[in-house]
Each structure stands twice: as C-alpha cells, then as structure tokens.
Image (cartoon, rainbow, N blue to C red):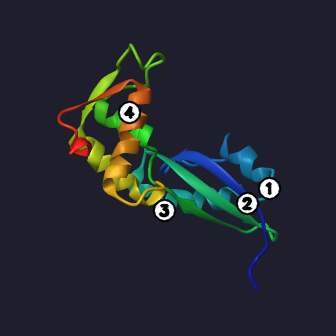
Amino acid sequence: MAKEITALVKLQVKGGAANPAPPIGPALGAKGVNIMEFCKQFNGRTQDKAGKVLPVVITVYADKSFDFIIKTPPAAVQLMDHAKAKKGSGVPQTTKVGTVTWEQVKLIAEDKMEDLNCFNVDSAMSMVAGTARSMGITVTGESPLSK
C-alpha cells in the first residue's frame, strides 16, 4: 500500500550547501522531518552542482519519512549567469542589465525542457526569452523563432 502524503514543501537551496538554518530548518521542522537527514541526502546528491540555486520539492509522508526531487536551476538564475548580471532590472522596459544571444537562450531552454510545460525547444526558447525580457536582459541576434 502507498504511503499517505501529508505535505509538499518547495524550497530553493544552493547545491551542496543545505544546512538546518532558515529556510530549510523551519520549513521541514514544522512538518516533523529529520532536518539533518535531508541535509545529508541533498548535499550528497548535489555535490556536482555546488553553489547553483536548485529548486527542490520535498514530499513528506504520514510516518515523517520523505522523498525529494531536485529540479534544474531556474531560468532567471541561468540567464543572470550568462549575462554576467548580479540581479535583474527594477525597470526592465527602460533599464537593461545585460545581453544574451539566441544560442545561450537555446542552451538554457534545452536544459530546462523537462521542467517547463512545453513540447518543443522553440516554445521553451520563447519562454526563456520572455523571462529575459522581464528581467531587463536583451536577447541579441537573429531570432530563430520568427522563421
């Protein structure tokens, strides 16, 4: 028989750097999860992605056990890395903080494909380009989407 799910906890944690301090400690402690066990497992599975922000979905069961799924880094974080920007623009329509090429957008879209709700790379590229636009990052070059 399947275990009864009591909660889903969604967090964004840096790879290889999970510790019981906020936000992890309070979020999991309130659900009765062994925080140190989660931190050990998460850090073990994310050693190769150290320092990258990773969304994680933790499924908490009635017997206080848990499973978790690690997703790919958010498109906004990847765009800031490629554009070498520290943060997005407060006024994205007028103040631009960086530029990325369509090739970089395609790389990000292919990486994020499993986490996005689209079926082809062109749709994923369109979503990533929209994220860039809303952050004040300009996408340069000839758009492969208009062909």
| Tag 2 and tag 3, C-beta contact below 8 Å | no
Residue at image point 80% right, 58% down: 32
Q: On the picture, is 144 further left or further right than 19?
A: left
Mark 3 = which residue? 45
- Sequence-first tag of 3 and 1: 1
Mark 2 = which residue? 34
Q: On the picture, is 39 further left or further right than 138?
A: right
Amino acid type for the residue under numbered disc 2: Asn
- Spatial CA distance of label 3 from label 4 is 29 Å
Q: Position of residue 115 (x, y in %)?
A: 47, 56
Mark 1 = which residue? 31
Q: On the picture, is 118 further left or further right than 97?
A: right
Q: Is disc 2 surrounded by few (<14), some (14 to 19) or many (20+) residues within 10 Å?
A: some
Q: Is residue 143 above or below residue 50?
A: above
Quadrant location of the N terminus in the rendered image: bottom right
- Spatial CA distance of label 1 from label 2 is 9 Å
- Spatial CA distance of label 3 from label 1 is 22 Å
Q: Position of residue 110 (x, y in %)?
A: 32, 55
Q: Secondary structure at mark 1?
A: loop
Count of numbered tags: 4
Amino acid type for the residue under numbered disc 1: Lys
Mark 4 = which residue? 132
Residue at image point 80% right, 55% down: 31
| Tag 1 and tag 4, C-beta contact below 8 Å | no
